[in-house]
Each structure stands twice: as C-alpha cells, then as structure tokens.
Image: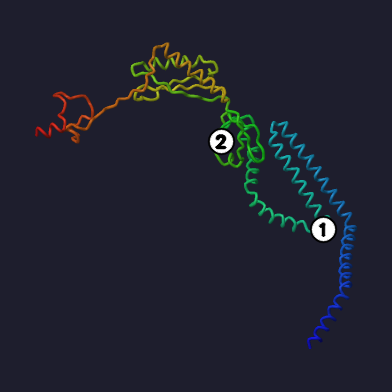
C-alpha cells in the first residue's frame, strides 16, 4: 500500500510539472489580452483625452486672465490685498470647473450631478480636516471685504500693538513699535475686539498732575492750559482741558487732556514735550508738586488701656493728664 501511494504521488507530481508551462502560457496570454484591451481603449479615447486636456488648459488660462484682471481692477481702487485673495479664488474655481468638465469628457458615463454629490461629501470631510485653515481663510476674506482697518493702520489686538503691514488670506502681519513682526491668525482678529488707533485723524491723550492743597486750583489750571497749548504738535482746534479730578491724600489731582495726530510716534513725542512743559510751568509759577506724605503710628501694646476701645490711644499723642500707666505698673499698684 505504501508503494502504491508513493507511485501515485509521483505520477501526480509529474502531471503537475507537465501542466505548469501551459498554465504560465495561459496566464501570460490573459495578461497580454488585458494590456491589448487597455491600449485599444486608450487609442479609442485619445480624442477624449485631448479634448479634456484642451478644456483644462483653456479654463486654467481663463482663470489666470480673470485673476489678473481682478487684481488689476482692485489695485486701481487701492485694495491690492483683496485683489490677491479674490484673484486666486477666481483662478482656482475656474480650474476646478475645468477638471470636472474634463472628467465628464474622458468618462462619458460619469454624470456631473454624481460627481458634484461625491465632491460634496468629500468637502465635508475636507472641511473637518482643515477647519482652522478654512476658518482663517474665510475670516481674511471678510476682513478684506469689510475693511475694518487698512494696511499702515495702527491697531491693537489682545497684547499685540503695531502697524499693519500685510493682510493675507490666512493671517495679518503687523510690525510692533519696537520692530518685531507679529503674525496674527485672521480668525482671532475677526472674533476678538480690535482697537484701530488711526481710524480717526486725531487722538486724545491725558496726564494727571498733583498740586499742593495750599495752592489755588483755578490758578494752577490756567497755568497748565497755557503751558500745554504752547507745545508744538498739540492740536489747537480742540481746546486743551485742565480738570480738577481727585482730592488725594497728599495733593489735588488735575487731569490734563489734549489732542494730537493719531500716529503713535506723534502721541509719544508730543506727550513727552507736554510733561516737560507742565513741570517747567509749575516751577515758574511756584506751584507746589508735593511728594506723597504718610503718617506712621507706633504702639507697643503695653499700656493698661489696651483692649479698651474707649480709652486706648493707638499711638496718638499723650492726652491731658499724662500718659497711661504701663500694664505692669497698673497691676502692681492695684
């Protein structure tokens, strides 16, 4: 039985070896048939490919021309940044339309409605994947359309303040007053409060001055208004104000208000000149600018009246009748 099984296995192996070339030849022939079919289909669809390529190129060139015209038109209206964003958007939208048309030309059975529906589902996933990028892009587009500020305006966003140098579709670039570049995402600018310091031609500044309680308030206000009004750069069309503002512990506070050009450099340099003029004017008028005065009371907590709120001195001068006895003496004598 073992010999018969061995002979049978040898015979089956020999038959498999004899059939192997036939299987290889048959598989090779099937592969060649498939390649021939692909080549034939490709040759048959060469006009479709050529037409699709022509459509894509034409719409791409049309998109480039439309983008160029958009940028040129908006540049004449002093809105170059908006032209860059809208020009790029128009170009790539037309290129996308060209790709859709090319796909329907190459595959006539493909219906545009199905393709658009598929792209709609894909766009949802794309939107979730690139949420922050799309959010910044849309915010940048809205900022360029609404124009809450312009290039070269001075703004403050959160802790950053400086001059706007460029507005892109993703971020806004500002140059701080000390020469640093800050890149702020457009979504942060669009959703947070923005202070546009150069939105108006003039800006009001203020400074508090302290005078002594023995000096005349009206006289001090006249001196301060006259001194600040003479400073070069202080706007003369809007009157300078000196307002008695607070009765502080050691002085009377007078708040000075004046107007300058809205640029930060003007406000800083003119403000420095105003402070200098205030100091010189008060010195010349012999109006006191007192130092802060404090009274410190010391109490050793050893008197017999400690704890008695009706008689306890808390460090004030000795009352009539002499100082209270120390606690140890009061206990000894009593």
Mark 1 and mark 2: Cα distance apart in space: 52 Å
Residue 235 versus residue 254: which sits nearer the camera? 254
**In terms of image quadrants, where is residue 79?**
top right
Residue 28 relative to residue 245: left or right: right
The residue to which callout 1 is attached is 107
User: Which circle's residue, 1 or 2, is located before the other in the chain?
Assistant: 1
Q: Say if 275 sits above or below 190 in the image.
A: above
Q: Residue at x 44, y 20 (%)?
A: 242
Residue 239 relative to residue 183: left or right: left
Q: Residue at x 73, y 39 (%)?
A: 87
The residue to which callout 2 is attached is 157
**In terms of image quadrants, where is residue 255?**
top left
Q: Quarter of the image containing the N terminus? A: bottom right
Q: Say if 146 sits above or below 32 in the image.
A: above
Question: x, y percentage for residue 305?
Answer: 17, 33
Q: Residue at x 78, y 58 (%)?
A: 111
Residue 120 relative to residue 182: left or right: right
Question: x, y percentage for residue 110?
Answer: 79, 59
């Amino acid at each position: 039985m073992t010999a018969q099984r061995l002979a049978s296995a040898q015979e089956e192996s020999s038959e498999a070896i004899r059939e192997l070339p036939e299987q290889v030849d048959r598989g090779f022939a099937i592969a060649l048939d498939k390649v021939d079919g692909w080549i034939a289909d490709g040759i048959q669809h060469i006009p479709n490919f050529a037409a699709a390529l022509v459509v894509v190129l034409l719409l791409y060139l049309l998109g480039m021309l439309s983008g160029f015209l958009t940028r040129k038109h908006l540049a004449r209206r002093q809105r170059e940044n908006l032209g860059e964003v809208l020009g790029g958007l128009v170009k790539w939208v037309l290129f996308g339309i060209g790709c859709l048309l090319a796909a329907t030309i190459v595959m006539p059975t493909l219906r545009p409605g199905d393709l658009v529906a598929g792209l709609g589902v894909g766009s949802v996933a794309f939107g979730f994947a690139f949420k922050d990028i799309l959010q910044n892009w849309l915010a940048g587009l809205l900022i360029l359309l609404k124009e809450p500020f312009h290039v070269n305006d001075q703004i403050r966003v959160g802790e950053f303040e400086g001059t706007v140098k460029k507005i892109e579709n993703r971020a806004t670039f500002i140059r701080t007053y000390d020469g640093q570049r800050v890149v702020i995402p457009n979504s942060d600018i669009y959703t947070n409060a923005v202070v546009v310091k150069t939105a108006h031609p003039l800006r009001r500044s203020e400074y508090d001055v302290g005078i002594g309680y023995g000096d005349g308030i009206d006289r001090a206000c006249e001196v301060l208004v006259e001194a600040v009004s003479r400073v070069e750069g202080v706007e003369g069309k809007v009157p300078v104000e000196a307002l008695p503002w607070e009765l502080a512990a050691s002085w009377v506070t007078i708040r000075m208000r004046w107007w300058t050009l809205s640029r930060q450099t003007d406000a800083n340099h003119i403000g420095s000149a105003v402070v200098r003029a205030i100091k010189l004017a008060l010195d010349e008028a012999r109006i006191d600018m007192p130092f802060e005065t404090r009274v410190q009371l010391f109490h050793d907590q050893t008197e017999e009246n400690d704890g008695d709120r009706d008689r306890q001195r808390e460090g004030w001068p000795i009352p009539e009748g002499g100082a209270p006895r120390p606690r140890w003496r009061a206990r000894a004598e009593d």
